[in-house]
Amino acid sequence: MEPLNKQSSLRPRYQQEDAAHDSRKALELCASLGDYQTSLTKFKNRKDIFERSVQGLKQILPIAFYAFYAVDEASFDIELEHCDQPDQKQYLDETLEALIEQGLVAQAFGEKRTLSAQSKDGEHALLLHALTTTSKTYGLFICFLKNRVLEDGIADTLTTIIIKSTCYALENFELYQLIDLKNEELTAKNQQISKSEIIYRNVFENTGNPTIIVDISGKITFSNSRFVAFSKCTREELQSKHFSDFIIKKRLNFAKLLQETQHQDPAKPIEYIFENRLHEKRTVFLQTSPLGIDNLHIISLTDITALKEVEKKLHFQAFHDPLTGLPNRILLQDRLKQAIRKRNRHPGSKYAVIFIDLDRFKSINDTLGHHVGDQLLIRVGEKIKDCVREMDTVARFGGDEFVILLQDIQSELDCERVSRRILEEFQTAMSIQGHEIFMSISMGILMSQAQPIDASDVIRLADMSMYEAKKQGRNKIVYFHDIADKEIEKKLFLENQLLKGIQENEFFVQYQPLMDLQTNRLFGFETLVRWNHPDLGIIPPNSFIPIAEEIGLIIPLGQKIFELAFQDYVRWIQAYPWVKDLCLSINLSVKQIYHRDIVKDIKSMAEKTHLPLKNVRLEITESIFLDNNEQAIETIRRLKELGISICIDDFGTGYSSLKYLKQFSIDLVKIDKLLIQDIPTNMTNFSIVSSMLELCDKLKLQVMAEGIETNEQLKKLKTMNCGLGQGFYFAAPQDKQMVEDSLLKGRA
Ligand code: C2E
Ligand code: CA
Ligand code: CA
């Protein structure tokens, strides 16, 4: 082994200029480390820092290799983390062992400056320095120098400076690592947030409806593109807009609107008129809901303008005769009801109903053709209108029948005058398409009655009087009071017959299959009553139901029908369990709805026969809507509570009101056979039926087409997506025996 002093002579004496050079180098290094402290991305790991430091040290000192021992701050265990000559590990460990024994390690940590030492084997001079900052202890840095002795004191001073810089570099490196980690976490979170924001934004954008978010005052804070398009504003313009800027309502109280629409019954949607920037008006339904943050609310609009227009058309059609434009029988009935009510309140107020029928109209139609017939009817309507006051109603009641309602007349004399004038008017010929036509008429008149009377009865009695006029030789006027006694007699006769018929069980029911048009499977049955009269044979319902209604016998008769149908249906379910999926439809007269015990009666009948009510459907005509009676709404609600479904019969011939369909919570709508019959050829009816189907689809109502007789009708209905159907094409009403035979064969 070479003597130490000889080894030391390997290096020339440390001169002043050397010191200046080394100091400069050390300072440059510190500066560059400082650089790294602020741009630490360049250090990938701690090893890089050590190597960088050692590179610097090497410019001042003859370094052979170095080692870094990391310290566990909790246990103070020391462990080799990095060494640029890994094969020296054992040598290093032994050296460290010796340094610990000599107390130099403890000293290094205590004094926090560079200590010089000698390796145990005397091969190397060592520099050891604890890497610490004010807050943290990293470990121990040991440099093994090529020379055995370190000659000059200046080296450890410079080393101290470098090592301190290394420590700060380490500290910053850790700090930045932490920041990186936090950054990563934040980025991940942000990504998550923006993902859900994208989802919500998409939902908001694609609700299909114009939708906005407003604050509690109604100021618009967000709007989807549909709303932008709907409002005809730009996004910038919307930023300064208030929702009420678009709603036509004097002094719209926005807070109240929110309240109203939030707790609104979906069955009674509130309509508003929306006016866009170009002053175009649309009818909308509003739906609002709180967003759950910052007192914001979502407002979503459904544009129902098209629906309203169709409804308006249907409504006009519903109340007017398409040929003459005169009020139809529904409107007439409505006005007549008002007149009756007025009369009941003020006995002094009088009205009169004149029922007019053209004599021998049919022969004109047959000889001169329908076109002339139609023109004639239009002219007759105009002629009659010319004879009455503006306030009176002239309605076309049916084919060649017209009905006049004279309101607020002083006495019978007024009515007499009007009817005479009409009769005179018809003394002159009418010139139609080159034909001179003389037309005589028969009139029946009913003056307001002292006792309470139904509108339909008033018309029926006026009609009866008109018949009497025809019988007496046409071109005549007959007053009901002149024939009343005879009529009363007739009514009494029928009343007795009906009552007897019920007691003697002369009534029976038939069932007509109801079909699911899409699957072509049996959907259920409609119950239809018939009267097997001992002398007159089978009488169809249209001939006795109106009378039974009038004299109140519809109540016991209705009960009988329920009883028969319930018994049959229960028997079928027991024999063929799949029948429990079929519905049982029963017609219910409006008079029955108004019967006090109707709900109770149906319920107890169902209990008695063990019939599940969930498959029962009651068919009611639209006339239930005419009175818009709270009692009717309540009865329907209670029936529905029992599980019964409600169906509107003969839809399209009466009110055709969507509002009522919703208000009464109707489940199914049956489109009247008159509309169905000529859909393959009549474009008007075709478009009426298809808009009805569209509307019902929007209102989530089931639809059934009545009176399907041909394959063409069926095909048309299927293309229009009509769900259910009934008619001779599938089957006529059948006796229960026939139904049982087909049930036996299994499900269609
Ligand atoms: P509705 O409720 O409209 O019953 C359908 C009527 O159309 C039935 O006449 C039926 O036989 C007939 N029909 C079925 N398919 C076709 C078809 O393809 N073409 C044509 N032209 N007609 C078809 P029905 O049995 O004479 O009954 C007439 C009306 O009497 C019923 O009309 C209903 O309003 C009333 N009605 C029948 N049974 C009852 C009942 O039990 N109670 C009450 N309150 N009314 C009833
Ligand atoms: Ca029916
Ligand atoms: Ca019907």
Image (cartoon, helix red, strand yellow):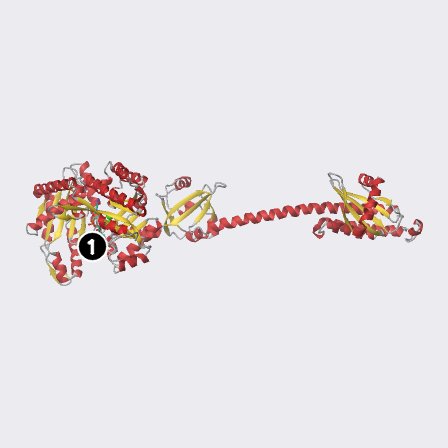
Left or right for 153, reference 627? right
Using the rendered view, name the quadrant where residue 260 is placed: top left
Neighbour class for label 1 at 10 Å: few (<14), some, many (≥20)? some
Instruction: Find disc 1 in the rendering and name its residue.
Output: 324
- Residue type, numbered disc 1: Thr
Which residue is depicted at the point 37% across and 41% down? 265
**Residue nearest the viewer, comparing 578 with 633:** 578
Image coords of residue 97 (percent x, y) = 82, 43
Image coords of residue 278 (percent x, y) = 40, 53
Residue 323 shows in the view: yes
Which residue is depicted at the point 17% across and 44% down? 507
Image coords of residue 693 (percent x, y) = 31, 53
Residue 318 shows in the view: no
Relative vertical location of residue 592 with respect to residue 313 in this rendering, above or below: above
Left or right for 651, reference 132? left
Q: Mark 1: which secondary structure?
A: loop
Which residue is depicted at the point 42% across and 39% down? 255
